[in-house]
Amino acid sequence: NRIVVRNTATQEETVLHLTPEQEKNDKHFHDPVTGVELEIIDRITLVEWLANNYKSFGASLEFVTDRSQEGSQFCRGFGGIGGMLRWRVDFAEMEMFAEMAEQQDFDDFI
């Protein structure tokens, strides 16, 4: 579930993504520093929020049912929610840049 909470002392709003099991634990609804109880402003299932807001992110939405073998495998493998990237990711290139960054001496950079 997607839950928006407000700290009543600071008026700061935070978005939480909690499982139904996590929602039963009160520690998620108290400020960890001050102990102030957080006010729940909005509670909506993540799927419903995605269905209402996907267009604002330039995304498209496709529903996959578990009625076919492929759909069932998709739903089990991704926990019911999956995504496709818009552009191809070259993981080998990303790894090369990460290795180059590790080899750099940033002490003299400043």
Image: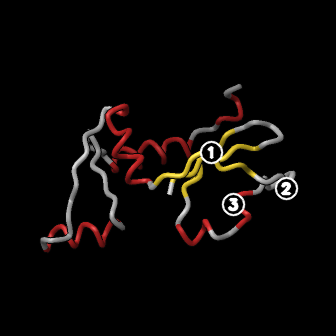
Residue wearing tag 2: 35
Amino acid type assigned to the residue bearing label 1 in the image: Ile
Q: Quadrant of residue 73?
A: bottom left
Cα distance in 3D space between marks 3 and 2: 11 Å
Q: Can you say whether 95 is above or below 72 in the image? A: above
* 3 sits to left or right of 86: right
Type of amino acid at the residue the image marks with label 3: His
Marks 2 and 1, Cα distance to the nearest angstrom? 18 Å
Q: Mark 1 points at which residue?
A: 41
Q: In the displayed orientation, state which residue is furthest to the right.
A: 34
> Is residue 52 or residue 79 the one in the foreground?
52
Proximity of marks 2 and 1: CB atoms separated by less than 8 Å: no
Determine the CA span between mark 1 and mark 3: 14 Å
Query: Percent position (x, y) of residue 22?
Result: 60, 68
Left or right, 27 with reference to 48 = right
Q: In front: 37, or 84?
A: 37
| Residue at (61% x, 65% y) in the render | 23
Q: Which amino acid does label 2 sit on?
A: Gly
Q: Which label's residue is closer to the chain start, 3 or 2?
A: 3
Disc 3 target residue: 28
Foreground: disc 1 or disc 3: 1
Q: Looking at the image, which is closer to me, 57 or 48?
A: 48
Name which of mark 2 and mark 1 comes first in the sequence: 2
**Looking at the image, do the residues carrying marks 3 and 2 touch, with CB atoms under 8 Å apart?**
no
